[in-house]
Image (tube, grey):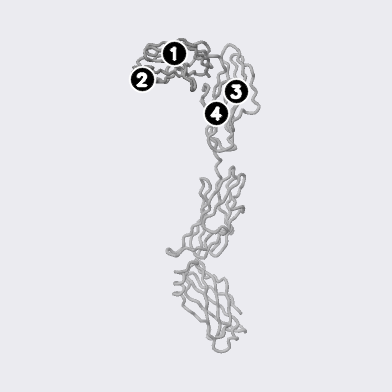
């Protein structure tokens, strides 16, 4: 704190130099005796001066000194300095008091000499106490709280001390700024006897992320409080599948469980990737999430939750498609990346539906299913009569390897297929009661149950 008292006097000019004092936006002429006011004995007092060339010709600034206990130049131009007509240069004189008392110094600018006076007033000394001891604070110094998570609290110990021989009063003690506060229950005396100390804790509990600023006010002196609020880290996600080890042609419920209850809200991503068992196979679009459809799903985490949500639901449904291979789920949440891998093993041919019908010329069989190896080769049809006997000519074997290979090479449906087989019948088609179909792929042969009308 400083109070500037300027004696009313004409501007001091020597030759071409005019000396003035800068206070805020105002520029005031300096008198032969200039009172710089008062400051707390713990604080420095800065006074900014301006030397201006008031003449129409250049002038050389050769001398700039301040002589007096506690006074120094902290911002001064390199000398000699040439000042053009009307040009000026600023410099700062600082008083750093050693204790309470009256201080004086002589400021010399070329041939101008000014007597400076100032007073240092006894006030409570403010200490910042840490692991490495105490640091004496001056007004305007910063108390840095560093980074603190939202919802957490960081404290700094401040100690007020009266090191002088006379009692001192504490008239004002407060903390300003959102997130900053004095610890509850702190009781301080309003009168500090000589040598008396009183500790207090100032806390920083950020309510939002980003830099935060406040002030500690001790009597008329202000100290800067600074800290950075950061969001707590999001918990580690874990991918949970139900069923845990599904195969092809299944629907799986996928949930994201959290390693601990979330201390902050956030969003994450669940990504689905597929590598077919046989290199060169086309992708299988049936491998995807449902609602919303696709291979990327966004999920959210609410504060206090232990499970992530997919648009208000705790799970999302995934289809495993109809192609053998490796399916990888990757969950990203904050700094965490977790994966779960499913091996979709090769399976025998799976028949999902079958229909046998009579036509005017014979029989028609329609089959639908999938072969996740895309390797159907041999198909055998066996017809039965009403009494369960195998009808002539017996099992009918057909090599369909080439047809299925061409189909799968151009299909965009993964391993899904539909087979339509037409059988002309000589004689009474009504004697046929059902048919069984055996389909062979690279894994094994699979046989349907009896298909009737």
**Label 3: element kind:** strand
Q: Earlier in the sequence, mark 1 or mark 4?
A: 1
**Closer to the N terminus: mark 3 or mark 4?**
3
Q: Depth-wise, is mark 3 or mark 1 nearer the camera?
A: 1
Name the residue tied to disc 2.
85
Q: Nearer the viewer, mark 2 or mark 3?
A: 2
Q: Secondary structure at mark 4?
A: strand
Q: Which marked residue is nearer to the observer: mark 4 or mark 2?
A: 2
Q: How many marks?
A: 4
Residue, disc 4: 225
Q: Which mark is residue 11?
A: 1
Quarter of the view holding residue 291: bottom right
Residue at 61% over, 23% down: 173
Secondary structure of the residue carrying tag 1 is: loop
Q: CA distance from mark 3 to mark 4?
A: 17 Å
| C-alpha span from label 1 to label 4 | 41 Å
What is the CA distance from the residue labelled 4 to the residue labelled 2?
Answer: 45 Å
Q: For residue 434, what is the image quadrant?
A: bottom right
| Distance (Cα) linking label 2 and label 3 | 57 Å
């Amino acid at each position: 704190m400083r109070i500037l008292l300027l004696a009313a006097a004409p501007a001091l000019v020597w030759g071409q130099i005019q000396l003035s004092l800068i206070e805020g936006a105002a520029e005031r002429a300096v008198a032969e005796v200039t009172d710089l006011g008062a400051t707390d004995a713990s604080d420095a007092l800065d006074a900014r001066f301006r030397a201006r060339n008031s003449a129409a010709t250049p002038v050389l600034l050769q001398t700039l000194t301040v002589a007096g206990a506690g006074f120094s130049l902290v911002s001064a131009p390199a000398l000699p300095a040439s000042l053009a007509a009307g040009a000026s240069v600023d410099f700062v004189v600082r008083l750093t008091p050693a204790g309470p008392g009256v201080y004086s110094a002589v400021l010399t600018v070329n041939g101008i000499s000014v007597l400076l006076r100032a007073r240092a007033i006894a006030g409570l000394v403010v200490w910042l106490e840490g692991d490495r001891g105490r640091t004496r604070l001056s007004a305007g110094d910063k108390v840095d709280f560093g980074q603190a998570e939202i919802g957490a609290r960081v404290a700094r110990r401040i100690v007020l001390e009266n090191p002088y021989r006379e009692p001192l009063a504490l008239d004002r003690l407060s903390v300003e700024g959102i997130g900053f506060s004095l610890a509850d229950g702190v009781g301080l005396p309003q009168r500090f006897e000589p040598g008396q100390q009183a500790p207090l804790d100032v806390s920083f509990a950020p309510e939002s992320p980003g830099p935060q600023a406040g002030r500690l006010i001790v009597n008329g002196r202000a100290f800067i409080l600074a800290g950075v609020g950061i969001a707590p880290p999001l918990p580690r996600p874990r991918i949970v599948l139900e069923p845990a080890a599904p195969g092809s042609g299944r629907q799986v419920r996928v949930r994201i469980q959290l390693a601990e209850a979330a201390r902050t809200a956030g969003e994450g991503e669940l990504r689905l990737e597929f590598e077919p068992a046989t290199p060169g196979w086309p992708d299988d679009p049936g491998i995807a999430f449902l609602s919303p459809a696709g291979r990327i799903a966004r999920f959210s985490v609410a504060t206090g939750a232990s499970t992530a949500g997919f648009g208000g639901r705790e799970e999302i449904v995934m289809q495993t498609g109809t192609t053998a291979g490796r399916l990888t789920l990757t969950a990203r949440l904050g700094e965490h990346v977790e994966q779960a891998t499913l091996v979709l093993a090769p399976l025998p041919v799976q028949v999902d539906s079958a229909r046998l019908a009579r036509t005017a010329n014979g029989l028609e069989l329609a089959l639908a299913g999938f072969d996740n190896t895309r390797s159907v080769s041999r198909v055998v049809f066996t017809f039965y009569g009403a009494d369960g006997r195998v009808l002539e000519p017996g099992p009918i074997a057909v090599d369909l390897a080439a047809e299925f290979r061409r189909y799968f090479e151009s299909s965009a449906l993964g391993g899904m297929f539909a087979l339509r087989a037409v059988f002309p019948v000589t004689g009474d088609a009504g004697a046929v009661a059902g048919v069984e179909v055996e389909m062979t792929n690279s894994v094994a042969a699979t046989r349907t149950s009896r298909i009737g009308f």
